[in-house]
Image: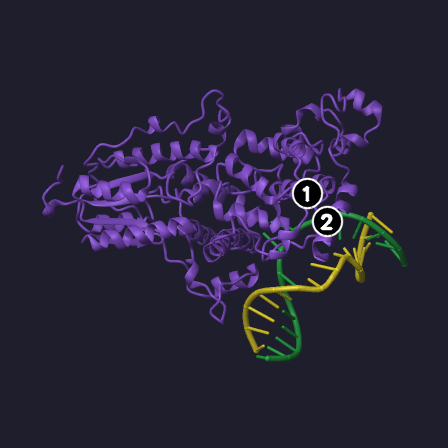
Chain colours: A purple, B green, C yellow
Amino acid sequence: MSGPASAEAPAIVWFRRDLRLADNPALRAAAESGRALVPLFILDEETPGLRGLGGAARWWLHHALAALDGALGDRGARLLLKRGAAAEVLPAVVEETGATAVYWNRCYEPAAVARDRGLKAELRAAGLAVESFNAGLLFEPWTVTTKAGDPFKVFTPFWRACRAGPAPAAPKPAPRSRRLAGPWTKGDRLDDWALLPRRPDWAAGFAEAWQPGEGGARRRLAAFLKHRLAAYATQRDRPDRDGTARLSAHLHWGEIGPRQVWHAVQHRVADSPGRGLAESAEVFLSELGWREFSYHLLFHNPTLPEANARGEFDAFPWRDDADALRAWRRGATGYPLVDAGMRQLWTAGWMHNRVRMIVASFLTKHLLMHWRAGEAWFWDTLVDADLASNVAGWQWVAGSGSDAAPYFRIFNPILQSRKFDPEGRYLRRWVPEIGRLSDDHLHCPWAAPQEALDAAGVRLGETYPQPIVDHAAARERALAAYREMRAD
DNA sequence: TTTTGAGTTGTTCGA
DNA sequence: GTCGAACAACTCAAA
């Protein structure tokens, strides 16, 4: 099958982690080229080294693609869906459509970088125009270096250097072009990809928590700026409040870009000046900074998903305890805050950031399980599962990251619970079987007097687990393990 | 090259 | 109840 005559040859816009029309430089460049467009998405589960999507991420992707197809449909186009190794699929689509140009926005994960570099060279050698752009980061990894020219390994100087340089470019609106014609060839049906879970449909609770797609992302950002930003600095740590932006999954799939978020925040601050707001905005922007930092770390250190950044942790005496891991996953550790977080993760596909740190600390320190076991579970269950953020976060908590929390910093799940969920609202929502305990006993039911347990209908070991480890003993064990590692 | 100040998010203990 | 120090040194980044 040969494509249309070359004068009318289309351009392919290869969507990957940029599932939006606004502030999408690849789409814009393609539209400005004057060619008709073939919007393409490839479900690539075959490129070696590319990690397959987790279950929750597949759910999100299904809806994100449906939303993107709908948005393209409003402009008279359809999203072409193809499945397979991109290194084979993309040249095949070029062949089928007779495209003479290909545009995409860059990915930064090591396997994707290698794949895209090869494709770009191959297609260019075949005479195509191929251009890639930045849609996913405020600052690309090779643009931020120390004065010695090395990548940063510590967040604070990294972010200072980012802030000292030129601000990220202002986002541009979606192209107006009506020539978003494609596809020119037959693609897969989204439903045939079976991205949604069935039997059992464990994602039943996701739909009420999330609205994947560019519109959902925009609404989420607008609501955050209007209602939550001003108090962000103080409320962001409270899992019992809805104080965070919840943009992580939207950002992961590029339904909104960090430049859009950045500039929207700046405008919000400029519109109504005030010290509290400006301060909160700084804290919020620095969270975007952590996302950037994680991407840079992974880009410069491709083994980060498997290997400890600090090599000494290769000698750490991790335990292998399937029962403990299962209890952690299911939210049955007997520590209410840990269990609440793990159940929120399972039910909503998301967990509040502070609770992520606490459950991660619990797994790696109280239970002495390898951070990779936790990282793998998060990868499968988080709708915002993101290789860079997930891996950097777990290595940070475990202490094996290059700029990690000191190992002796071990979260006390009871203190954290009292401090950040003082009225127990978060606990009661996710661990209702102990909800009738008083605010005080709720955080550590094993310490409650028998009468209080009876009155609340709690039978430890039956209706709610006994704690699987004793905090003080587990803490000592973790510190001893750390000393053992260092002694080697 | 050497020096110096600093480093996301904590906990525990003893005064 | 509050406060400061210990926890353990170590590495980074800049001068």
Q: Are marks 1 and 2 on the same chain?
A: yes
A118 over C11 or under it: above or below: above
- The span from disc 1 to disc 2 (Cα, nearest Å) is 8 Å
Task: Please name the amino acid that badge 1 sits on.
Answer: Leu
- Residue C10 versus residue A196: which sits nearer the camera? C10
Image mark count: 2
Camera-side residue of A427 and A485: A485
Q: Is residue A430 above or below residue A236?
A: above
- Locate residue A146 relative to residue A184 in the image: left or right: right
What residue type is disc 2 on? Ala
The image quadrant that residue A411 belongs to is top right
Mark 1 closeness class: few <14, some 14–19, many ≥20 residues within 10 Å: many
Upstream in the sequence, badge 1 or badge 2? 1
Q: Are marks 1 and 2 in contact (CB under 8 Å)?
A: yes
Chain of the residue where label 2 is placed in the rendered structure: A
Residue highlighted by disc 2? A481
The residue at the point 39 percent across, 42 percent down is A255
Place of residue A206 in the rendered image (x, y in percent of width and height, measured from the top left):
49, 29
Q: Examine the image and state in which quarter residue A347 appears.
A: top right
Place of residue A330 in the rendered image (x, y in percent of width and height, measured from the top left):
62, 29
Q: Position of residue A482 (x, y in %)?
A: 71, 52
Query: Would residue A187 appear left or right of A264 to someone viewing this image?
Result: left
- Residue under circle 1? A368
Image quarter in which the N terminus of chain A is found? top left
**Chain letter of disc 1 in the image:** A
Image quarter of residue A472: top right
Q: Is residue A71 visible in this depiction of the protein? A: yes
